[in-house]
Amino acid sequence: MAMRSALTDSDRDRDVRRYKDVFGRFCTGVTAVTSVAAGQPVGFACQSFSALSLDPQLAMLSVQRSSTTWPRIREVGRFAVSFLAADHEEVALALARRGGDKFAGLSWSESSAGHPIPDGVLAYVDCRLANELDGGDHLIVVAAVEEMTVVREAEPLLFFRGEFKKVS
C-alpha cells in the first residue's frame, strides 16, 4: 500500500483507466437490486453479482460505498436481485440514476416477499442480508437466498467494456 500512496494524481488516473480497461473485458450480467423502504420502492442497477455457495445458498454483490440507495436497503435487511433481460436496458438505466423516483415509468410487480420485480425479468432471488465486508471503495454484500423464481426464457442484458451488450 505504501507504493500506492506515492502515485501522483496523474499516475492514479492512468492506473484507474487501465484497471477499467482490463476488467471491462470481463462480461457480466446486469441485475436490479430492489426493496421497499419507508413504503417506497428503492433499487439500483448492479453488474457485480454472483452465486457464492450452494450450502448454505448464498449470493454476493458489490455496492459502491457512495451509494445512497444501499443504506436504505441495508436497513430493511431484505431485498430481491432480478436478472435483467436484453430488452431491459431502460430498466437498468432508470435504476442506475442518482436521486429521484427510479421507479417512475417502470412496470413492476411484487415478489411473494413484497420486493419490487421489474416486469419480464429472466429470474429473481429474494434475499436476506447475511454479511457485509470491506471491499475498498465498495462493500461486498453476502446475501442468504430465501426464494428463487424463474420468470421467462430470453437473452440476458450484458455489460462489456463499459456498455450494455446483447448476445449476438
Image (tube, rainbow, N blue to C red):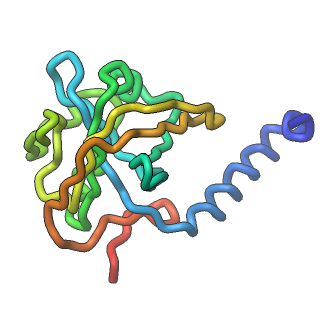
From the top left corner, tell me how far across and down residue 153 is, in percent.
Answer: 17, 72
Q: Position of residue 145 (x, y in %)?
A: 33, 44
With respect to residue 162, does 9 lie above or below?
Answer: above
Q: Nearer the viewer, residue 29 or 78?
A: 78
Q: Residue at x 47, y 39 (%)?
A: 142
Q: In the orientation shown, which residue stands out farthest toward the bottom?
A: 168
Residue 104 lies left or right of residue 147; in this view the side is: left
- In this picture, is 51 found above or below 75? below
Residue 95: tell me if it is visible: no
Q: How many marks?
A: 0
**What is the quadrant of the N terminus in the image?**
top right
Quadrant including the C terminus: bottom left
Residue 66 appears left or right of 1: left
As displayed, is residue 158 above or below residue 38? below
Q: Nearer the viewer, residue 17 or 143?
A: 143
Judge whether 29 appears above or below 68 on screen: below
Q: Residue placed at 15% from the left, 19% from the top?
A: 39
Look at 39% across and 31% down and name the residue there.
129
107 sits left or right of 145 in the view: left
Can residue 5 be seen? yes
Where on the picture, by quarter, is residue 122? bottom left
Task: Name the side, left or right, on which 163 lies relative to 161.
Answer: left
